[in-house]
Amino acid sequence: MKQNLDWANLPFGYMKTNYNVRCYYRDGKWGELEVSSSEYLTVHMAATGLHYGQEAFEGLKAFKGKDSKVRVFRWEENAKRLQNSAKGVMMAEVSDELFKKAMDKVIELNADFVPPYESGASLYIRPLLFGSGAQVGVKPASEYTFIMFVTPVGPYFKEGFKPVNMLITREYDRAAPLGTGHLKVGGNYAASLRSIDKAHHLNFANVLYLDAKEKKYIDECGPANFFAIKGNTYITPESKSILPSITNMSLLQLAKDLGLTVERRPVLETELGGFDEVGACGTAAVISPIREIVDMQNNIKYEYCKDGQAGEVSTKLYNKLRAIQYGDEPDTHNWVSVIM
Ligand SMILES: *Cc1c(COP(=O)(O)O)cnc(C)c1O
């Protein structure tokens, strides 16, 4: 049934669709993929996902092109990252094959919810994996649940880029130096909620985290990676507690294609004053240009986008990546898979 939604004005939020898909790991193996029209789960009250944070998730998008084909961006990287997260918190791994099968099925079953090309909206895909077996002692579960659901999301920037502001705070850390920051697990998000709430109360879009140990280096930018442009160089921090963003990895490649030098290395906070453009990157927005970073404790303000506009290089990278995702420009790196 054709959906009559105001696609261009959808928020980045949850909306009920037709179906989701589920798979259960029991007795040492994954069962058959199941289709459900329920938004609810029946979960054992002693499931490790609930008590001990044995949980990981992913986020990727499907885009409808001018040619009406539906494309997914670099799903193999999401599958790989979910496998890595599963290893990191000792869960059963979801193979590339199972991931792809679930993804094809959930998109196909919700084809009416893939937003039209003109809207600039997309279909957000949320894979979720958690320990569903009962356990009271602290050890990995013997049963796992893998779910994939979708929800249509509007274009992040409706009237072009809106540069945002970021707060540096030393009161909270998102992830420990040798903790789980490099895994896409729920616990990192729980740990970030208080600092993000504080940033929102002070009218900031998000928090720019410093490294937990020395509070000298740039780590992550809320639930997104940080990058900077300095002259002809694309710079992004290297740290064990950063989640490897697929968007960042792609922008880095596109920067190279544009002839920029790329650097992935520890980035000092004190370098912030010398950057021409800075931004946050991730699947949701691709790029959120940053206009201001405030280090409250040290009473420092770093400013960018002086004319209120996003920087030239950030804009170029953003347009290029979006064009590849929607099939408007050649996919020279083989990043896109046509699903339908
Ligand atoms: C998901 C996520 C990102 C962005 O990763 P993408 O693959 O680009 O969507 C960045 N940081 C954190 C903490 C994340 O969870």
Image (spheres, rainbow, N blue to C red):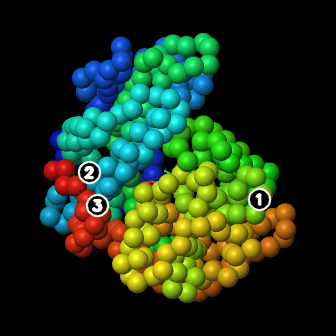
Amino acid type, residue under disc 2 in the picture: Val
Residue corresponding to mark 1: 215
Quick one: label 1 or label 3, which is nearer the N terminus? Answer: 1
Q: Mark 2: is the Cβ under 8 angstroms from ligand 1? A: no
Q: What residue lies at 52% left-to-right and 81% top-to-bottom? A: 233
The reply to whether residue 106 is visible in this rendering is no
Estimate the spatial distance between the alpha carbons at disc 3 and disc 2, rounded to whole Å.
19 Å
User: Number of labelled discs?
Assistant: 3
Picture residue at 50% right of the left edge, 54% below the top: 244
On the image, the x and y values in percent for residue 179 come to 64, 42
Label 2 crowding class (10 Å Cα cut-off): few <14, some 14-19, many 20+?
many
Q: Nearer the viewer, residue 241 or 284?
A: 241
Where, quadrant-wise, is the N terminus in this rendering? Answer: top left
In what element is the residue under mark 2?
loop
For the residue labelled by badge 1, is the local secondary structure a helix, a strand or a loop?
loop
Judge by depth and name the residue closer to the eye, 196 or 87.
Answer: 87
What residue is shown with label 2? 114
Q: Is residue 246 above or below residue 112?
A: below
Asked if residue 95 lies left or right of residue 294, the reply is left
The amino acid marked with disc number 1 is Lys
Q: Kindly identify which residue carries mark 3.
A: 335
Q: CA distance from mark 1 to mark 3?
A: 36 Å
102 or 218: nearer the eye? 218
> Which residue is at 25% across, 59% downward?
336
Q: Is residue 263 above or below residue 203?
A: below
Res 183 visible: yes
Rendered view: 67 above or below 243: below
Q: Nearer the viewer, residue 18 or 222?
A: 222
